[in-house]
Image (cartoon, helix red, strand yellow):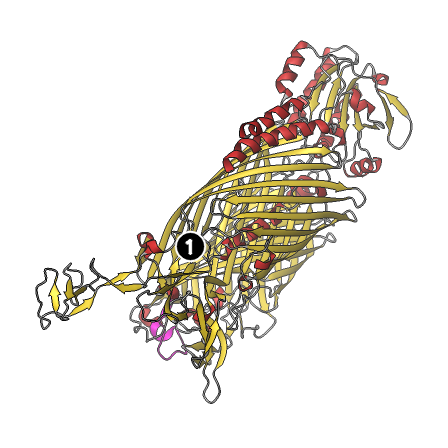
Amino acid sequence: MLINLRLLPYALLAFAPWQQVAALAVNDAAPNCALSTINSKQALHLSDYRGKVVYVDFWASWCGPCAKSFPFLNELHQQLHARGVEIIGVNLDETPADADAFLAKYPANFTIVTDNNQQCAQDFAVQAMPSSYIIDQKGQIHHVHLGFKAGEAAELQALVEKLLTTTKP
Amino acid sequence: MPKLRCYFLLPMLIAMSLVLSGCSSVAPWQRGTLAKPQMAASRSELAATMRSHNYGSREAASSSGSSGGGGCGCY
Amino acid sequence: MAATKISPLQALTVAALALPGLWAADCQAEEDEINFQYSRYQESRRNLIKTPNHSTPIEVDSLFGSAKVTLADRVKFAFNYSQDTWSGATPITVAPLVAGSNQSVVQTVKGSKPVVVGASPIIASRQIILNKNLKPLAFNNKGKFLGKDLRVVNVLSTASPETRKQGDFKLGYEWDEAALYAGGGISVENDYESRFGNINGRWDLNQKLTTLNLGLSYTNSDTSAIIDHDASTYLTKTAFLKQIDNQGAYQILTGNRQDWGSNFGISQVLNKEAFVEANVAYTRSTGYMENPYKATTVVFVDPEQPGINRLIGDVKALLEQRPDERDQWALTGSYHQYIGLFDAALHFNYRYFQDTWGISAHTFEAEWAQPIATTWTLTPRIRYYSQDAADFYTPYLTSKQAYEGIAKDATGREILVDADNPNNGKQYFRNDDFNLIDSSGNLVDENTLSTIPKTVAFDPKKLPANFSSDQRLSAFGAISGGVNLKKQITKGVSVEAGFEYYSHAGGLKLGGGGEGSYADFGYYVANASLNVNLASLNAGRKPGDHTGHSAHHHHHQGGAAPAGVMFAHMMNKADDVMVGYRFMHSHTGGNMLNGDGIASDASILANGCATRKAGCKMVPTYMDMSMHMLDIMYAPTDWLNLMLMPQFMDMQMNLRQLDGAPAPKLGEHIHAGTGHATGGIGDTGMYAMIKLFDLSSIHHLHLTLGLSAPTGDVDITLRRTHKADEGFIHYGMQLGSGTWDLKPSLTYTGQLDDWSWGAQVSTTRRLEDKNASGYALGDIFESTAWGSYRLNHWLSASVRGLYSAQSAVSGKFNPTPGLVKGKLKKNVNPNNSSVDYASNYGGRYWDMGFGLNAQINNGDLAGNSFGVEWLQPVATDVNGYQLDRGGAISATWAVAF
């Protein structure tokens, strides 16, 4: 009896779903998901931005590191927008009012859109909050970055700039 | 009895959680409610430390955690 | 999860990470913060059944501080500090009620009946009568038999204030899905020192839906307890003789203890609105685990006494004995659920505890966190606890043996020894004719040798190996309820206040069978705290941006003032908030001074205690004072700043006898040896700073108007010792002024390039002639000037001169009536030491200060500044007879929003 009990936990492990983790990989085509601007029904598609380097950042109001990333994204927009970099912040809040409150505290000068039915998040298979996807001018994913820490800003900026110089517009 | 617990409980806890994890699949962007401040497991650490010190000075079942130490509680 | 194409390399990488999984940022991530908390714990009076209880119950004043900062991207550092000062009456032992161990202190006044005014403990040297079943019997004053009385009662003894301080730190590294922390700390108090270290690891799985935690800790503690001077002669300590050191008049009991702890926990998200946690902990403790101040009453009943139905029992108190080992297990489960209807969260927690001392305990806790109107959070909580008694717990013991008996040899003959030389090994007996014979049987002439019976102590093996009457190990239940209210004041600062009431009762034990109601007590605790969130400091600012609020006024104001100067800096933007902490420690010691010269013991003897006929007897040897001050500043407009400054103090000092002082009279008690300590919350200041002018951003002048509220105790008394009440502890050891005080000051600062300078005059005027205890501290005048030079962009150094003057204390302590050996004395306030006299306070002081200031201008921690300053006494001219000054150090931290 004792021996049987001891084996029970290990037997249970058979029922554990060994998670199949699938992620969007580098060099995959970026999904052309439908996005809309906050508070309006105007629709946008990622394919609209072909020919520009696109930095897609998935964020939400309840996410601490997202607040830290906004100053960096603002800086990036200010410096590189003229050179053909489009930063798109995709909001994943389930309550739009929360997103508005967050933007009031941490204003953004880059494009903010919302993903109404979380379809885009699923297409991109977002693994973490925030998640950033750097997409080149041809629509290919060049880099996937999970989370945000202040020290990573320089590295991300370098990656974006590299895409600007290596690929002819 | 403690020995049985040792061999049984620990693996049991791990197994249960892995099984339970299959029941839940909360996507990373759906963690908003869990991130609310009132949902935090410990909302005020200093107050919790103070309470634990008060209880520990009057009760035998002190919380054996990783903090250790701290006076003989000999009020 | 949707499957998409994965290249072979990706698949391998993913598979390798499959068990830990790819991580997802935990959005309950900890943010950098600094917290301060004050709490006050107050117990209820214990029921002594037959005697009134006038002793102050246990009170504890505590201060807590904690800081969590991110040093580099992934390196986190946490530091915690706590200190408590506690005093009051606590049970030493439990005794049968008929033993009358809480002796009524009777006030005998001529012409009226004696009145009972209090209780003092007598823990041994009493006798009680028991029946043949060893149950205590009660008799009234006239000797009339009243029947069996099985009641027991706590025997209380009062402790003088004692302070405990603890500091600990944690340093860790965070990977994407894991973290590792190492930490350690030390806790110090007069009689106990504990050092501990720990390691913690965290591992996130399943995109952070599952988290595993593992912790290991080691603690090593040393007890060095001075056995209560009063109780010492009554305590039987034979079991611990090897651990007792005799130092002069005091006996010190030492012991060492080690604890090895481990814990493993799992946290699992169930769905979008709930998660659970489970934890198992195991601790192994070895060594000296007794409480050195607790004893167990043992009633020794000599089996050879003549009585049968009326047996005489000797009531003795033995230091408690606990096993040398203790294995403890605790299983905890928590459930956290979001309640959408109220936007609240319910937290439920259950813990089961079991150890090898026979104690098993259940704890149920529930909390409801309710946000109200965006900035408030109300959290009521309830808790129920129930435990079994330890196997060796007993209110008291009876033992069928004499406490001290006459030694007998194998045949039952009483052994006699030489009265003049009892330990020479020679034994004598009485033969059948009652003549004295030696061990060989030869007659001994009793004219040449006087004999006494050889005494033998009780046999400890006839007692249980372990026994304790500490309520902490008894069977009881406890229920407590409390509430916490939190308010967010501004973007980074929030305050919290909480209250809890706790009731311990044998009757509350789960399943019944708890200790009797004599052991019941309750306590309430109130706490207040301030939380500063450093992450909000720089929110919304671009990295490398120097135009935010905080950086703005640091550049504007130039170098910061030295750490020892208060009210030197004003915020000049409306709605700015600044939080700061200041620590100050000063030491006086060395020579005794009179005026500006050294005073000899002879002169202090003659003149130091002005009104005492017999002259002075004691002088202080040293006095240390530590102050922790919190200042919270808010600028309603750009020319007005409001500040609240609560403070927490602790003081320690000791005294010595003067050379040439006459020997103590019979019954007169000399304090020297252990010293005195006090601690707790001090006076609270409220200030308004008004800008008078700002000239071309070089010169600045402001006026500060302050009011100090007397929240610090001024009625701390010494404990009753040697059957004598002792009155108020001297003026310098009280925690506050006891009066409302006006504190105006005028401050000028200037800055140009790398130089900055300033000057300040300030005064403290007492608004009342005397406080509730009958005296008022002297008025204070201070003037100071300083210069500071910026060494590089973050560090500056300062030099300062300070002149301060304080008048002597006016008035004196109200007379405290008290009882000395049963007789009422009109005033028992101490008067045999120079510190007891109001004229020996105040003086004129000249100091020089040397300081350093640092400011963090970049990165996440920008806006924090630190300062440290050493104040070196240059000249001292004291009123009367006082200790020389050793210097003071100030250290500050401030953060501006």
| Residue beneath the point at 68% across and 20% down | A158
- Image x and y of residue C158, in percent: 47, 65
Q: Chain of mark 1?
A: C
Per the image, label 1 sits on a secondary structure element best described as: loop
In terms of image quadrants, where is residue C676?
Answer: bottom left
Q: Residues within 10 Å of mark 1 (few under 14, many from 20)?
A: many
Query: Which residue is at the front of the view, C608 or C700?
Result: C608
Query: Seen in the image, is C576 located left or right of residue B13?
Result: right
In terms of image quadrants, where is residue A8?
Answer: top right
Query: Which residue is at the front of the view, C606 or C32?
Result: C32
Query: Which residue is at the front of the view, C882 or B71?
Result: B71
Predominant secondary structure, magenta span: loop
Magenta region: which residues?
A: C605-619
Q: Is residue C761 visible?
A: no
Q: Which residue is mark 1?
A: C467
Q: Quadrant of the C terminus of chain C?
A: top right
Q: Is residue A84 visible?
A: yes
Residue that sits furthest to the bottom in the current view? C111
Q: Quadrant of the N terminus of chain C?
A: top right
Query: Which residue is at the front of the view, C740 or C442?
Result: C442
Is residue C614 a member of the stretch shown in magenta? yes
| Residue beneath the point at 37% across and 56% down | C463
- Image x and y of residue C320, in percent: 41, 56
